[in-house]
Image (cartoon, grey):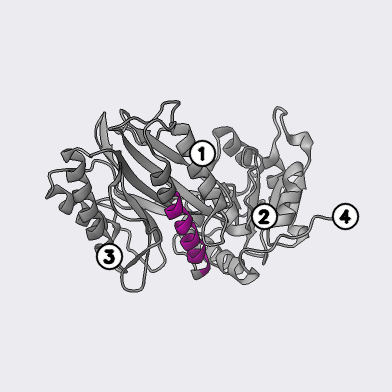
């Protein structure tokens, strides 16, 4: 018996388009073979979403081969056979004897395959940022005749412009994220444990919306009084109190693609300060979205937000957002002044306007959006209001 192929999320033509785009970038950098070990990039190139990145694994793209080869651990190999689009011959397991031993690991199997392809003396691209020093030394030692080229963000930049198929998944994820924001407004009440609120949010992002289930869970940050000046903190064992403020950041997932959203809740009457920053942030958000269009830059979007917010007497120290896609963050374009990345249709961003003003006071609102042919489209659409819980 063999494990069956899962229903493919994207057609073969979509993956071949991605491979061709990566090969074009490889050619620009004079790279004959590319070894990809960043899990987000592996997902993009293969459709594989199982959680095995805790051990060495790699996808090898060769200018000579139509399909990439995926080399991974023996016990994870059936998951790749099930999920990845490539032929069985190009999904290669390495033995369990390479796990937990000194001096050898899965990268030996990856390097063996590079050698088997006759690429040992060629220009080989590696994702330097995703390799430890000892792993880099192994590539240098075992491929002494190869020129190793840093291709740390090559695939990430290709991922930056989404296909319409990818955008469709992010819309579905956005609808689930919206449902989670509204569910939070239903369950946040005085006397309710923060953990129970988190449980209801997670239940919603898994059950999904509009007949589409969530296929994974990602970060959930629930920053409740007196911790609203924090940004990346989980729920606690506390119960919610009258007068509390809660800053929420969550994401929903459809087949690895994430849409993220942030909203703020006030249990009882919000303070004047909270109302003022909310008004300024919403105005800034709308200005930023209006500035997001093809030909504009990340700098333009951030400038529009910062200029508007300043009129309300507030300043945001952190950047205004970043590229988003597979498993949330893409390490490429950044919505901040000075980033002159030019926006293109179907680029996607998390317009992240969380603002941590003091150590005990902050506010959060955000949208995931895509650049369209003429402007922008939000992929999350929960009400842009300060949720007041009475």
Question: Whole-percent x and y of residue 326?
Answer: 51, 53
Disc 1 designates what residue? 199
Question: Whole-percent x and y of residue 141?
Answer: 64, 38
**Badge 4 vs badge 1, beta-carbon distance below 8 Å:** no
Identify the image quadrant of residue 99: top right
Looking at the image, the residue that sits furthest to the front is 390
Residue 174 lies within the magenta run:
yes
Disc 2 designates what residue? 119
Looking at the image, the residue that sits furthest to the right is 1
Question: Whole-percent x and y of residue 314?
Answer: 16, 43
Identify the image quadrant of residue 191: top left
- Residue, x 34% and y 40% (percent of image)? 247
Q: In which quarter of the image is the N terminus?
A: bottom right
> Could you tell me if residue 341 is visible in this image?
yes
Q: Distance between the residues labelled 4 and 2?
A: 35 Å
Please report the bounds of the magenta region as a residue range: 165-180
| Secondary structure of the residue carrying numbered label 1 | helix
């Amino acid at each position: 018996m063999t494990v069956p192929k899962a229903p493919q999320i994207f057609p073969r033509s979509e993956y071949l388009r991605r491979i061709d785009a990566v090969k074009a970038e490889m050619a620009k950098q004079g790279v004959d073979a590319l070894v990809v070990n960043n899990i987000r990039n592996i997902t993009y190139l293969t459709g594989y979403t199982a959680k095995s990145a805790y051990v060495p694994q790699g996808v090898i793209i060769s200018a000579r081969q139509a399909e990439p080869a995926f080399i991974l651990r023996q016990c994870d190999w059936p998951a790749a056979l099930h999920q990845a689009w490539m032929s069985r011959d190009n999904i290669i397991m390495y033995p369990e004897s390479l796990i937990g031993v000194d001096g050898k690991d899965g990268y030996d199997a990856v390097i063996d395959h590079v050698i088997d392809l006759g690429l040992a003396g060629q220009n080989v691209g590696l994702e330097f940022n995703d390799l430890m020093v000892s792993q880099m030394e192994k590539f240098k030692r075992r491929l002494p005749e190869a020129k190793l080229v840093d291709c740390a963000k090559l695939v990430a930049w290709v991922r930056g412009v989404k296909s319409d198929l990818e955008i469709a998944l992010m819309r579905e994820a956005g609808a689930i994220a919206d449902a989670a924001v509204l569910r939070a407004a239903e369950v946040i009440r005085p006397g309710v444990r923060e953990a129970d609120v988190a449980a209801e949010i997670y239940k919603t992002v898994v059950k999904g919306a509009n007949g589409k289930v969530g296929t994974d869970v990602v970060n959930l940050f629930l920053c409740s009084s007196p911790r609203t000046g924090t940004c990346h903190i989980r729920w606690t064992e506390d119960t919610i109190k009258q007068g509390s403020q809660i800053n929420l950041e969550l994401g929903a997932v459809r087949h690895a693609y994430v849409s993220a959203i942030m909203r703020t809740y006030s249990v009882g009457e919000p303070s004047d300060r909270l109302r003022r920053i909310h008004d300024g942030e919403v105005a800034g958000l709308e200005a930023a979205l209006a500035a997001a269009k093809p030909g504009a830059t990340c700098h333009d979007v951030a400038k529009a937000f910062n200029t508007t917010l300043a009129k309300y007497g507030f300043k945001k120290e952190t950047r205004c957002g970043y590229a988003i896609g597979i498993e949330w963050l893409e390490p490429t374009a950044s919505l901040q002044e000075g980033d002159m990345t030019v926006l293109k249709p179907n680029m996607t961003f998390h317009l992240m306007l969380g603002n941590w003003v003091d150590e005990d006071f902050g506010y959060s609102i955000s949208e995931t959006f895509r650049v369209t042919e003429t402007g922008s489209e939000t992929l999350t659409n929960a009400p842009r209001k300060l949720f007041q819980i009475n």
